[in-house]
Image (cartoon, rainbow, N blue to C red):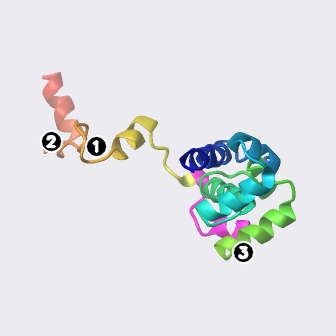
Amino acid sequence: MASLNRHLLRARDLMDARYADPLDVPTLARAAHVSPAHFSRRFKTAFGETPHQYLLTRRLERAASLLRGTDYSVARICMEVGLASVGSFTSSFKRVYGSTPTAYRDSFPPAAQMAHIPTCILMAASRPAGGRMRAPVPLPAMESSFEEDVARVAT
């Protein structure tokens, strides 16, 4: 039983990592080392949704992230997350998020206006607080102005 759960986790990890690839139940069942029918039944029992529903959820989550953070067209995002039909993508997205992909994107600031944050800062800020490493603390504001500093150095 434990080995089957480990194999199911392996198949789920495969879906998480390769959501944009054309994954079907027989391929996922091979990764879990069981028959396709047994895989579908066990996956739904273990995770509460069918493999197809799980994969579609991952793809829509990634699409929502791309809609918020890029200026890619809806068609390009649809293809990048592994979906072939823009119409099916739009209706699935609307069912899950309550709005069309275009309306969802419009509810966020344009990606071109978003400030780019260096990866090192993002990584430092997202570290757990309990470890030795801490997020960088902003330096206290200097009481002198830039012009005063330049004048001090010039003298």
104 drawn magenta = yes
Q: Secondary structure at mark 1?
A: loop
**Is residue 9 visible from the viewing direction of this image?**
yes
Q: Please rate how many residues cluster around mark 3, counting C-alpha atoms within 10 Å: few if below 14, some from 14 to 19, many from 20.
A: few
Residue at mark 2: 144
Where disc 2 sits, the SS reads loop
User: Going from the N terminus, do you reach mark 1 or mark 2 first?
Assistant: 1
Is residue 24 shown to the viewer in this render?
no
Q: Quick one: label 1, few (<14), some, or many (20+) residues within 10 Å? A: some
Q: Quadrant of the C terminus?
A: top left
N-term mark: 3 or 1: 3
Which circle, 3 or 2, is nearer the viewer?
Answer: 3
Main secondary-structure element of the magenta-colored stretch: helix
Position of 54 relative to 8 (above/below): below
Please identify the residue farthest to the front as the structure is shown: 1
Residue at x 73%, y 50% (from the top left corner): 81
Give coordinates of residue 88: x percent, y percent.
84, 65
- Residue type, label 3: Arg
Closest to the observer, 50 or 73: 50
x and y, in percent, of residue 74 in the image: 77, 58
Residue stretch rendered in magenta on the structure: 100-112
The disc label shown at residue 135, or none: 1
User: Along the line of sight, which residue is nearer the eye, 123 or 43?
Assistant: 43
Counting residues from the N terminus, which is met first, the one under dot 3 or under dot 2? 3
